[in-house]
Image (tube, rainbow, N blue to C red):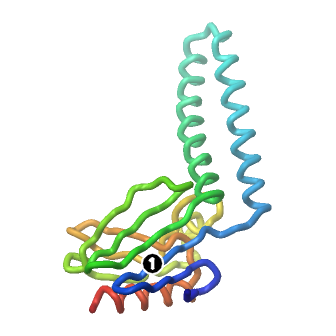
Amino acid sequence: MEYIGKRISVKRKEKEISIVILTEVNKIKRTLLFCWFFLWSASGVIVFTQSFMIHDENTKVAVIVWLGFWAYFEYKIFKAYMWRRFGLEKIKLRDNKLFYKRDVAGKGKIKVFEYDFIKDFRIIDKKERSFIDNLNDSYWVVAGERIAFDYYGKEIKLGLQVDDVETAGLYKLLKQEIKQ
């Protein structure tokens, strides 16, 4: 087994390469993310239960709108926590196809990409002063992919929040295999 950095492992078999990218493990941040999720959930439940006592129509509408936003961010926080707790990326290169899966606790959809239709394979550059790039690289979101390619006109991204050294190694390996 080979390693590219701390989080990427590569296993080679006959006519197959398996790559696993682990999520960053920071127990303090993961605990804080869980606390955030727990407190956010509690606040939503409290507001929801108290909303039945409201008689003013304008206030009811405001609370319903707030609960809509609350539900959206509840989902996003839960998704981020599950990714940090149980998530990993799996890439397999076999039979002139790239198989990609974002695995969360054994669940996830496998996407298949044929080498012949993969175009413009590239590294996504981070801009240090970009607010969006800094947000995407934060621990609290599931974003910040570093490698991309075009497939039937659609941009496909992989390599969540890998550092520059890992990105370069992963890019070199994938580019070498896809070009064969």
The answer to whether residue 134 is above or below residue 3 is above
Please identify the quarter of the rendering in which residue 172 is found: bottom left
The answer to whether residue 174 is above or below residue 98 is below
Task: Residue lying at the far top in this picture: please name it.
Answer: 55
Where does the N terminus fall, quadrant-wise?
bottom right
Say which of 56 and 106 sits in front. 106
Say which of 150 and 23 sits in front. 23
Secondary structure at badge 1 equals strand
Q: Residue at x 58, y 17 (%)?
A: 60
Expressed as whole percent of the image width and height from the top left, the position of residue 155 reads 32, 68
Q: Residue at x 39, y 68 (%)?
A: 100
Characterize the local packing of mark 1: few (<14), some (14-19) or many (20 or more) Cα atoms within 10 angstroms: some
Q: Residue at x 25, y 71 (%)?
A: 151
- For the residue marked with disc 1, what is the amino acid? Ser
List the residue tagged with mark 1. Answer: 18
Expressed as whole percent of the image width and height from the top left, the position of residue 161 reads 56, 72
